[in-house]
């Protein structure tokens, strides 16, 4: 029997509101910090399939979330496309060489770098109960490209935006390479046991409307169509963070089966703007979860009420903050589950 989260994604009736949190497997959990200390660096943990599977399952064991999200990173795709990847302590990811000239064609693909992630998915699938939906994921092409071009994260994604304006053909070629790798990567996750997948476009909000259409909507639509064709019946959740007023167009034009909503969107407006019956996911502010108190309770109630007549997965508007008290997570789960 499928879990309530999977039922919700295919618009089937469910007896309860499913809930999971983005980045639920990670730094706010003491059991994660203990394991991370044993394994060393972040990438070493991702590539230790047994350990990555354990991290994926830790929040399920503690909280009983309805979804288990694969413990990995969106930058595995550029790593498989041939860039070197490492994580600087306290500074974040680095990719080399940075593709400021758009010359990604000089990279040597290494798709075997996906294999350890597939093993993690298979291990998690073996250990999960049938009521917990296993979610795979990848970064969307625009967001991944911002890291590949700059060689690291950036505040305004200046390097990628400049390349897209200055040489759209070269940038389109890079986007196409990311698309193809992402399709292969997600199909591999599905074949290993993922029951649904999420596309994270964390930096979608940095683009103008025309660029959003070209570099966010169109690539995600092509990926979604390919997954629907090659692995029919597997739901795809799109998460274009910061999309704002462009969110309804994303929902209509990408063909995603579920839509992740960030914390800047008003749930009542979203419900009124989106196609009837489209499942949505979100959108509690992670900082509210960190802060707690009456404001947290009120926001949870508002979200539940606004989406009472629409298939809804309760989640955060972005990833859980590493300082979040575990008691706050437990409190929200009680509110959502009644």
Image (tube, rainbow, N blue to C red):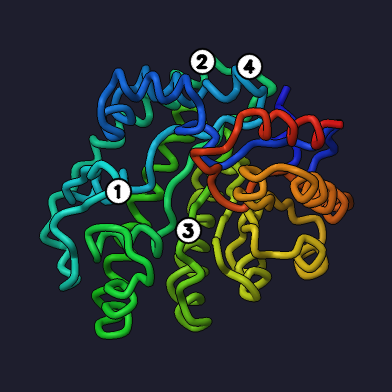
Q: Is residue 311 visible?
A: no
Query: Which is more toward the observer, 69 or 82?
Result: 69
Q: CA distance from mark 4 to mark 3?
A: 30 Å
Q: Residues within 10 Å of mark 2 (few under 14, many from 20)?
A: few
Q: Earlier in the sequence, mark 1 or mark 3?
A: 1
Q: CA distance from mark 4 to mark 2?
A: 8 Å
- Relative to 197, 85 lies left or right: left
Q: Residues within 10 Å of mark 4 (few under 14, many from 20)?
A: few
Q: Provide the secondary structure element on which disc 2 rests.
A: helix
Q: Earlier in the sequence, mark 4 or mark 3?
A: 4
- Relative to 155, 294 lies left or right: right
Q: Provide the secondary structure element on which disc 1 rests.
A: strand
The answer to whether the residues at label 1 and label 4 have Cβ atoms under 8 Å apart is no
Question: Against 62, is 217 above or below?
Answer: below
Q: Which residue is drawn at the image coordinates 65% and 23% (left, top)?
A: 63
The answer to whether the residues at label 4 and label 2 have Cβ atoms under 8 Å apart is no
Q: Which residue is drawn at the image coordinates 67% and 28% (left, top)?
A: 327
Of tags 4 and 3, the one toward the viewer is 3
Residue under circle 3? 202
Provide residue 313's location: percent of width, then percent of height: 72, 43
Residue under circle 4? 129
Residue 92: numbered disc: 1
Q: Is residue 135 visible?
A: yes
Q: Earlier in the sequence, mark 1 or mark 2?
A: 1
Q: CA distance from mark 3 to mark 2?
A: 30 Å
Q: Residues within 10 Å of mark 1 (few under 14, many from 20)?
A: few
Residue under circle 2? 126
Q: Earlier in the sequence, mark 1 or mark 4?
A: 1
Provide residue 256's location: percent of width, then percent of height: 61, 56
Q: Residues within 10 Å of mark 3 (few under 14, many from 20)?
A: some
Q: CA distance from mark 1 to mark 2?
A: 32 Å
């Amino acid at each position: 029997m499928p879990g309530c989260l999977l039922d919700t994604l295919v618009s089937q009736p469910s007896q309860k509101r499913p809930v999971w949190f983005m980045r639920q497997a990670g730094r706010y959990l003491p059991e994660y910090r203990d394991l991370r200390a044993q394994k060393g660096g972040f990438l070493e943990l991702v590539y230790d399939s047994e350990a990555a599977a354990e991290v994926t399952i830790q929040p399920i064991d503690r909280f009983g979330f309805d979804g288990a999200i694969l413990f990995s990173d969106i930058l595995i795709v550029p790593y498989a496309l041939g860039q070197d990847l490492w994580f600087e302590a306290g500074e974040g990811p680095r990719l080399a060489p940075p593709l400021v000239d758009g010359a990604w064609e000089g990279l040597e693909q290494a798709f075997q770098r996906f294999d350890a992630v597939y093993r993690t998915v298979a291990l998690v699938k073996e250990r999960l109960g049938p009521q917990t939906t296993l979610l795979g994921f990848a970064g969307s092409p625009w967001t991944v490209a911002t890291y590949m071009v700059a060689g690291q994260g950036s505040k305004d994604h200046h390097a990628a935006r400049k390349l897209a304006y200055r040489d759209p053909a070269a940038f389109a070629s890079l986007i196409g390479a990311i698309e193809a790798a992402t399709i292969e990567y997600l199909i591999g996750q599905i074949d290993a046991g993922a029951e649904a997948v999420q596309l994270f476009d964390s930096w979608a909000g940095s683009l103008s409307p025309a660029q959003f259409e070209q570099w966010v909507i169109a690539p995600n639509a092509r990926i979604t169509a390919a997954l629907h064709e090659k692995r029919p019946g597997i739901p795809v959740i799109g998460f274009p963070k910061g999309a704002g007023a462009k969110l309804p167009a994303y929902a209509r034009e990408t063909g995603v089966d579920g839509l992740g909503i960030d914390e800047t969107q008003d749930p009542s407006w979203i419900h009124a703007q989106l196609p009837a019956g489209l499942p949505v996911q979100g959108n509690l502010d992670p900082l509210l979860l960190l802060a707690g108190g009456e404001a947290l309770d009120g926001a949870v109630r508002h979200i539940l009420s606004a989406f009472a007549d629409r298939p809804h997965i309760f989640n955060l508007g972005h990833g859980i903050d590493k300082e979040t008290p575990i008691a706050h997570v437990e409190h929200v789960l009680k509110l959502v589950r009644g």
